[in-house]
């Protein structure tokens, strides 16, 4: 007996009436007429939990660790009731041949209908043999599993962009998923790691609405990656007021002033850290006193020290120049920052979009 | 093939049937294991191979030493933070930076939180399925399970028959759905599983409880470091400034509410270790009293640098003292000095790297890491489809670190052996009490050494260490509050933050008791930039291939002479390997010194 999506929903306390309403909403959302509601309901009632193959390339497993931190939904509910996590070498019982066999079984049974989740990336140097699975290059496993999947989730900055092992000089030629797989829809969920609840939200969105979330130009879900950390930072008023931390553990640090001068990358980093926050909303890097290091941005390892002040904040073209002046003459820094802030306010008032050279992916 | 006698006392016989396990799952990273079994299915030769490498050390060259912590933190997201801590310690050591007492205490609490978290997740989510059969839990009587729970841990509140019935129902529906998810293709009818159904059900319940709770434990990192995995660190102290009652305290990183929040998480960790983790390990172990295999080098040849000083920078106050014990002689503990070029050395005779002279070892400050992916003349398969390794040649991306040429085991069991032998009261009490509890449950009369030198002993030591760390955190938190009460709210020393204050050249070393064992980072700084960076990590010690003298490492030693129920189902291999909590991304992060370009493959 295969437990269906409908049964899982019922088991979680969702009534038949709510279930039908859900089907109706889904039909509307998909642009289908009322006639499709019973069809969707039927599909839900007979459909097994969607299988996921979760592969690991060159990585550090921080994405898996983050995933199991999810508070809503709990990781156990995702794994036991929402999806069928058939392959994930971090937690699966089977090993060796029995583990390898699962990939083939899934391909055979769910050809074109499973989700491929990728953590890490394939290295291309050394004939791919700097990441070996079952005696073969990880790239082989990845391309084989990708060929038969429905869609790919690129977890974290490794799969999305390359991350730390791809930092210069990228000794293993670690390569993000979208550069080796070209014929499948790919959702990038960057971050090192991504926020736990963002990860489970992406999965549950796909399950609930049976479609990919809306993606920006870089392939990231707009719902979590359309704003800079700076845009919603609780310390933003201090930025606007020109109140900055100047040295670690100074008076300003104790008052929670803005960390911009300490190198915070919040102004150029698209992520949900300042809104959803981390670990069930407990905190986020800036609240804990360290600047953002920009870990959800492409190539963030090679964009200067964590402590080097941003001089090229895209939306503040004018004051970026002011800041460069400040950097060459230390005495001018205060003035330059003041100019920076003033200009930022003026600019905000004058224009709301269209920033040349911006890294924004969703224009 | 004839029998090879290793200098460290093992007889390797590769004449029997070869069994290959690749991938080894429920570990961090990628690993392969091959063994030869004799006619009685007893393992007579073991070959462990690290099958990934990423090259972080070369990536670090030329970068700002103050940035290094974030790079090396990404060596591993499971033992998250321990490489970052080791890194800031190495940089501070090189530059002569002393951190304030509050920063030390906050770092200690973070490190011990990681210990508890990592050990709990390891036991329940990576290791338990080697002992626990979730399918067998369906046969359990919930009422009897409740009685078992109340017997092994009267203090744990979640113990009613209804509670266990609900969990059993959920597992039953899951199994009956036909979609077994992570339990698919497990070895559930293998006689290697010994637990009665009630113990299986209790353990499955705690698998789920631990999964729910671990996400709360790490919130300590979120308060101090902003996120987990990968909290933020800082050279010179910690970035979380303290503001107890000044202006804008509410928006400060640390205030009364934040510190209370941390204390609440510490209390949860203490309770979970006392009421769930330790009783579970002892109860499960007692059902495997006849399976005391897997000791290998454990409790026999062990090493640690020492950790958790009561007074920072005073190694004599280490609450887990370091040292080396060789050949099972508990009467002599050798001191360890990570700076001594004669002590810690890495060899590559059987690793996919080249040295000018591969008979020699190199100290990490002078480490060379030139890749050389080459398979021996007797390997089977092709270069990109390996069927069997040739262990007489190179066969792993892991180097072979040795202490004065000796293969040693590192990890909680090593730390516990060293602490027990050196008379640390807390540890002596824990070990003696738990060995007595084990004997009582199992009806045996074993001594501490016999219990400890086994796969079960390794797993027990890890649980005891989690408990000790949770208790130590209570002291750390109290001391931190005491400092603040006395008017000291300093969290960072910025005297040498500016590279202009640094010497032209400097070198340093940082060590940490990482969850998996002794961790060391060695750094050389020149003109304000990283000149050389080398990490020697626990899984490099434990998962090392043979060295030029032929000594086998801890993983391989632990598998020797273990009987397998069914060689095609590697339950016993997984059990002993998992007892080390292997972390392959840690062990194989290294890369060419000069970052030489290898063959490039064109990307479409």
Image: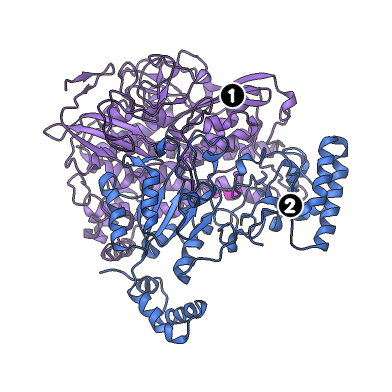
Chain colours: A blue, B purple
Return the residue found at the far left.
B39
Please tell me which residue is depicted at 51% across the width and 34% down the height of the picture.
A171
Assess whether residue B261 is covered by the magenta stretch: yes
Which disc number belongs to residue B207? none
Res. B575 image quadrant: top left
- Residue matched to label 1: B313
Q: Which residues are magenta?
A: B260-264
User: Which chain contains the residue that carries disc 2?
Assistant: A
What's the magenta bit mostly, secondary-structure-wise? helix
Q: Is residue B581 above or below residue A212?
A: above
Looking at the rendering, in which quadrant would you find the C terminus of chain A? Answer: bottom right
SS category of the residue bearing label 2: helix
Label 2 environment density (alpha carbons within 10 Å; few <14, some 14–19, many ≥20): some
- Residue matched to label 2: A314
SS category of the residue bearing label 1: loop
Q: Position of residue A13 (x, y in %)?
A: 41, 74
- In the foreground, A346 or A79: A346
- In the foreground, B477 or B121: B121
Assess whether residue B162 is covered by the magenta stretch: no
- In the foreground, B134 or A292: A292
């Amino acid at each position: 007996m295969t437990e269906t999506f409908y049964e899982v929903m019922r088991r979680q306390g969702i009534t038949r009436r709510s279930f039908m309403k859900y089907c109706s909403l889904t039909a509307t959302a998909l642009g289908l007429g009322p006639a499709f509601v019973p069809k969707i309901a039927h599909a839900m009632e007979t459909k097994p939990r969607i299988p996921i193959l979760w592969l690991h390339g060159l990585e550090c497993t921080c994405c898996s660790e983050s995933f199991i931190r999810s508070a809503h939904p709990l990781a156990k509910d995702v794994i036991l009731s929402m999806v069928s996590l058939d392959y994930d070498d971090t937690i699966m019982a089977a090993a060796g041949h029995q583990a390898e066999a699962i990939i083939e079984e899934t391909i055979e049974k769910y050809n074109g209908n499973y989700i491929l989740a990728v953590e890490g990336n394939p290295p291309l140097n050394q004939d791919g043999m700097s990441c070996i699975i079952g005696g073969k290059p990880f790239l082989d496993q990845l391309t084989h599993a990708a060929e038969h999947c429905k869609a790919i989730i690129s977890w974290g900055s490794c799969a999305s962009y390359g991350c730390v092992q791809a930092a210069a000089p990228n000794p293993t030629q670690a390569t993000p998923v979208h550069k080796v797989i070209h014929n499948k829809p790919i959702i990038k969920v960057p971050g090192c790691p991504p926020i736990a609840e963002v990860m489970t939200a992406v999965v549950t969105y796909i399950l609930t609405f049976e479609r990919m979330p809306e993606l920006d130009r870089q392939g990231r879900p707009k719902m979590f990656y359309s704003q800079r950390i700076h845009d919603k930072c609780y310390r933003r008023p201090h930025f606007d007021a020109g109140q900055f931390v100047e040295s670690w553990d100074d008076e300003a640090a104790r008052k929670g002033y803005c960390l911009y001068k300490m190198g915070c990358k919040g102004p150029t980093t698209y992520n949900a850290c300042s809104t959803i926050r981390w670990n069930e909303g407990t905190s986020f890097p800036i609240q804990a006193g360290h600047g953002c290091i920009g870990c959800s941005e492409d190539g963030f390892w090679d964009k200067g020290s964590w402590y080097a002040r941003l001089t090229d904040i895209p939306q503040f073209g004018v004051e970026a120049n002011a800041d460069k002046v400040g950097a060459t003459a230390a005495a001018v820094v205060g003035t330059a920052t003041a100019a920076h802030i003033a200009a930022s306010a003026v600019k905000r008032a004058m224009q709301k979009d269209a920033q040349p050279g911006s890294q924004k992916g969703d224009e | 093939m004839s029998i090879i006698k290793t200098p460290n006392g093992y007889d390797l016989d590769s004449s029997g049937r070869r069994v290959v396990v690749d991938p080894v799952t429920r570990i961090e990273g990628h690993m392969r294991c091959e063994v030869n079994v004799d006619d009685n299915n007893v393992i007579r030769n073991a070959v462990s191979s690290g099958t990934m490498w990423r090259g972080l050390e070369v990536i670090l060259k030329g970068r700002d030493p103050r940035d290094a912590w974030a790079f090396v933190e990404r060596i591993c997201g499971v033992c998250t933070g321990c490489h970052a801590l080791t890194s800031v310690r190495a940089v501070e050591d090189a530059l002569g930076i002393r951190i304030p007492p509050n920063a030390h205490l906050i770092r200690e609490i973070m490190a011990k939180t990681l210990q508890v978290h990592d050990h709990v997740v390891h036991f329940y989510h990576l290791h338990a399925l080697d002992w626990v059969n979730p399918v067998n839990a369906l046969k359990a009587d919930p009422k009897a399970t409740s009685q078992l729970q109340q017997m092994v841990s009267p203090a744990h509140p979640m113990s009613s028959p209804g509670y266990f019935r609900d969990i059993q129902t959920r597992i039953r529906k899951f199994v009956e759905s036909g979609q077994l998810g992570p339990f698919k293709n497990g070895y559930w009818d293998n006689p290697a599983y010994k637990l009665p159904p009630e113990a299986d059900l209790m353990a499955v319940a705690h698998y789920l409880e631990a999964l729910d709770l671990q996400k709360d434990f790490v919130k300590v990192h979120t308060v101090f470091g902003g996120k987990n995995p990968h909290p933020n660190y800082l050279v010179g102290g910690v970035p979380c400034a303290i503001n107890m009652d000044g202006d804008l305290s509410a928006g400060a990183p640390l205030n009364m509410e934040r510190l209370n929040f941390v204390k609440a998480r510490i209390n949860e960790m203490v309770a979970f270790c006392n009421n769930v983790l330790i009783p579970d390990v002892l109860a499960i172990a007692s059902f495997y009293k006849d399976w005391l295999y897997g000791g290998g080098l454990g409790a026999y040849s062990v090493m640690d640098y020492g950790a958790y000083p009561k007074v920072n920078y005073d190694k004599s106050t280490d609450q887990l003292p370091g040292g080396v014990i060789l050949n099972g002689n508990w009467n002599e503990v050798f001191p360890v000095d990570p700076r001594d070029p004669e002590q810690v050395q890495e060899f590559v005779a059987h690793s996919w790297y080249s040295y000018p002279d591969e008979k020699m070892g190199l100290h990490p400050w002078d480490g060379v890491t030139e890749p050389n992916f080459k398979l021996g003349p007797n390997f089977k398969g092709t270069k990109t489809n390996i069927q069997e390794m040739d262990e007489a040649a190179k066969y792993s991306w892991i180097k072979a670190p040795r202490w004065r040429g000796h293969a040693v085991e590192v990890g909680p069991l090593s730390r516990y052996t060293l602490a027990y032998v050196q008379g640390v009261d807390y540890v002596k009490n824990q070990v003696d009490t738990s060995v007595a509890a084990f004997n009582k449950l199992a009806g045996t009369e074993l001594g501490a050494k016999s219990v400890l030198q086994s796969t079960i002993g390794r797993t027990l030591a890890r649980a005891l260490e989690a408990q000790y760390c949770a208790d130590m955190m209570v002291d750390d938190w109290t001391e931190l509050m005491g400092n603040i009460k006395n008017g000291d709210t300093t969290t960072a020393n910025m005297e040498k933050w500016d590279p202009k204050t640094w010497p032209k050249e400097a070198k340093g070393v940082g060590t940490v008791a990482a969850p998996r064992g002794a961790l060391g980072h060695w750094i050389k700084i020149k003109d304000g930039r990283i000149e050389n960076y080398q990490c020697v990590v626990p899984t490099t010690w434990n998962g090392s291939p043979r060295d030029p003298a032929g000594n086998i490492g801890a993983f391989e030693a632990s598998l020797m002479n273990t009987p397998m129920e069914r060689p095609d189902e590697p339950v016993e291999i997984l059990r002993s390997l998992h007892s080390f909590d292997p972390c392959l991304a840690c062990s194989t992060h290294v890369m060419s010194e000069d970052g030489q370009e290898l063959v490039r493959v064109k990307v479409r």
